[in-house]
Image: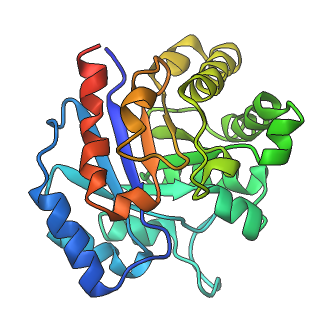
Amino acid sequence: MGRKFFVGGNWKCNGTTEEVNKIVSTLNAGEVPSQDVVEVVVSPPFVFLPLVKTSLRPDFHVAAQNCWVKKGGAFTGEVSAEMLVNLSIPWVIIGHSERRLILKESNEFVADKVAYALSQGLKVIACIGETLEQREAGSTVAVVAEQTKAIAAKISNWTDVVLAYEPVWAIGTGKVATPAQAQEVHFELRKWLQANVSPEVAASTRIIYGGSVTAANCKELAAQPDVDGFLVGGASLKPEFIDIIKSAEVKKNA
């Protein structure tokens, strides 16, 4: 059984009610491959989750952009996994580099969040990736392995985990990892999973790429054997997101 192509749209901290309705209308009208070819998940800010959930086409799903590391309570400003489950939100993004870098979320904290979200029945898009300094120092593989290792230490079941490799230097910068660079890291990650988790998990876990993915570069990236989809930032707010979803056809026809 091949890995089903996965396209996530991370809207980040963007949108008004009017803009969100417009994006959803565009998505609802888009002609995309069927659900057996591609899984599509969009991630609006917390305040728009119920609106998007009720208005979005049924073959697309919704993700939160973060959730708290344990049960809710006296944690002002946080949103718990239980709340997301209560709203029937199936997915959550955890460990995005913006949270790791700006809010100083450590590998261990991210891993604890992943484990707790999974324990509550959420599916997780777990983000990993290196900075420009780390890449230039030649430590890309060591950095992403360390990030993945922290998660692997806390979870036993990878069925509901999608790994998103997002080189920090390529997020929102217009710089994109070349298809060969993306494939190299995805290959190394899969090799790490095979050696440190299991061959089954390595073969079945989807590893998606994020970092300035656009309609112009998505097909070439999608053609790489270990690239199982995308986590799209800025382009997920534009009509070209439909074209990126369509790149799943590259895998189907491979």
Residue 211: image x %, image y %? 55, 47
- Colour mapping: rainbow
Residue 117, visible in the rendered structure: yes
Residue plotted at (54% across, 66% down): 67
Residue 80: image x %, image y %? 52, 71
Relative depth, front residue between 77 and 129: 129
Quarter occupied by the N terminus: top left
Residue 115, visible in the rendered structure: no
Asked whether, in this view, residue 126 is left or right of residue 91, the answer is right
> In the picture shown, does residue 19 fall above or below 124?
below
Residue 112: image x %, image y %? 68, 53
Relative depth, front residue between 85 and 65: 65
Total numbered badges shown on the rendered structure? 0
Asked whether, in this view, residue 114 is left or right of residue 233, the answer is right
Quarter occupied by the C terminus: top left
Residue 52: image x %, image y %? 25, 71
Asked whether, in this view, residue 251 is left or right of residue 114, the answer is left
Residue plotted at (86% across, 30% down): 138
